[in-house]
Amino acid sequence: MAKVLLTGGAGYIGSHTAVEFLEAGIDVVVVDNFSNSSPKAIKRVEQITGKSVALYEADVCDKDATRKIFDEHRLDAVVHFAGYKAVGESVKKPVEYYRNNLDSALVVCELMREYDVRGIVFSSSATVYGVSENVPFKEDAPTGGCTNPYGWTKYMIEQILRDYANATPGVSATLLRYFNPVGAHPSGEIGEDPYGEPNNLAPYVCQVAVGRLPLLRVFGNDYPTPDGTGVRDFIHVVDLAKGHVAAFQHMKEGVRTYNLGTGHGYSVFDMINAFKRVNNVEIPYKIVDRRPGDVATSYADPSLANSELEWKATLGLDDMCRDAYNWQRKNPNGYRD
Ligand code: NAD
Ligand code: UDP
């Protein structure tokens, strides 16, 4: 049976991806240091799927600790999620971000080389398109011009993986540029569980909906968009997770880059209104100043992934809002209960 290592697999996207791999009949090994997650997420993955996951608590930057996993499992590929991801925090702690994100990626490359593991799928981000608003983004659009250290780590790791795969015959590197993952598994057993006040729109809306936060701040209503609020390509995390299975199943020697998005832009007001309607809840909000660094509009052209990976997002904004709220209501304090 094929086997994949998910670094950072206890996190939000990793845990959903673990479910989809297991349901596709592919074995999963997870390594996580739980710096932004809980081992409970993996227990829930096992409950949902009825299958077991080999779970290791380790820092992927620690090469000896991570080598043990490569030693104990014959891996077909690594899906590399591990990394810090908070944009604002990365501005305040750039060294920690570069250290953790770059070192973990380099350790993965070194161990893949040492153990002749031939496939890597990497969690990149639409943030590599920088401040450009030439939407929809295609994969060959210019990258760089990132507005924060987090974005630069994604840009740099993409380059490291391109160089590594180009220099190493037989290796396949798939760079997946995620747009805005939201929602949760429909079971409500796994979902997004940010520590502290959420930075992103969907978890903020969820916490307002359950009364954990009093009010949503809408960052600007004077953008050149249909209703003045920012427009993003929100994608259901289950669709996104399935994109990783498709990437694994379509691995080919060399480097490939794919946008994972729906191809549709939804505004902040679209999200609030869908959330209210689908869940029959109030979302009190107020308009405040724009958030520095935000672009007006960002959405994907996902046609390359649609054709080459035979993958397409199928869930809509209503599904995202329903499943996100279901998770939040069942787990008002995330995994901390
Ligand atoms: P997350 O924080 O929930 O998951 C990341 C996981 O990696 C966490 O479980 C964390 O504990 C773990 N981790 C961090 N550093 C580690 C290390 N050195 N060793 C072992 N484990 C480590 O984040 P997520 O939303 O699931 O994101 C997964 C990946 O996707 C990240 O690389 C992120 O940058 C990328 N990404 C996320 C988004 C998003 O909006 N969520 C968008 C684009 C890209
Ligand atoms: N946003 C908002 N209030 C919040 C968080 C986000 O109005 O509390 C807006 C933000 O300005 C952007 C959109 O929601 O237009 C998506 O923001 P998010 O941080 O989720 O994603 P990103 O900006 O990284 O694409």
Image (spheres, rainbow, N blue to C red):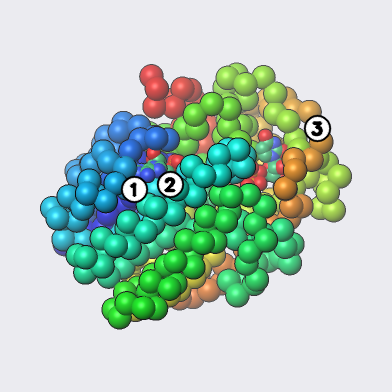
Measure the C-alpha gap from mark 2 to mark 3. 33 Å
The residue singled out by tag 3 in the image is: 288
| Front residue of this view, candidates 319 and 232 | 232
The answer to which quarter of the image holds residue 281 is top right
| Front residue of this view, candidates 235 and 65 | 65
Q: Amino acid at mark 3?
A: Val
Q: Is mark 3 within 8 Å of ligand 2?
A: no
Q: Residue 244 at x, y = what percent?
A: 39, 60
Q: Residue at x 26, y 67 (%)?
A: 113
Discs 1, 2 touching: Cβ within 8 Å: yes
Q: Is residue 213 visible?
A: yes
The residue singled out by tag 1 in the image is: 61
Measure the C-alpha gap from mark 1 to mark 3. 39 Å
In what element is the residue under mark 2?
helix
Q: Residue 123 at x, y = what percent?
A: 45, 56
Q: How packed is label 1: few (under 14 Cα within 10 Å), some, or many (20 or more)?
A: many
- Where 278 sits versus 233, above or below? above
Q: Amino acid at mark 2?
A: Asn
Q: Residue at x 63, y 28 (%)?
A: 280
Of the four image quadrants, the one with ligand 1 is: top left
Between label 2 and label 3, give the one nearer the viewer: 2
The residue singled out by tag 2 in the image is: 100
Between label 1 and label 3, give the one nearer the viewer: 1
Q: Is residue 18 visible?
A: no
Q: Which mark is residue 170?
A: none
- Where 296 sits versus 269, above or below? below
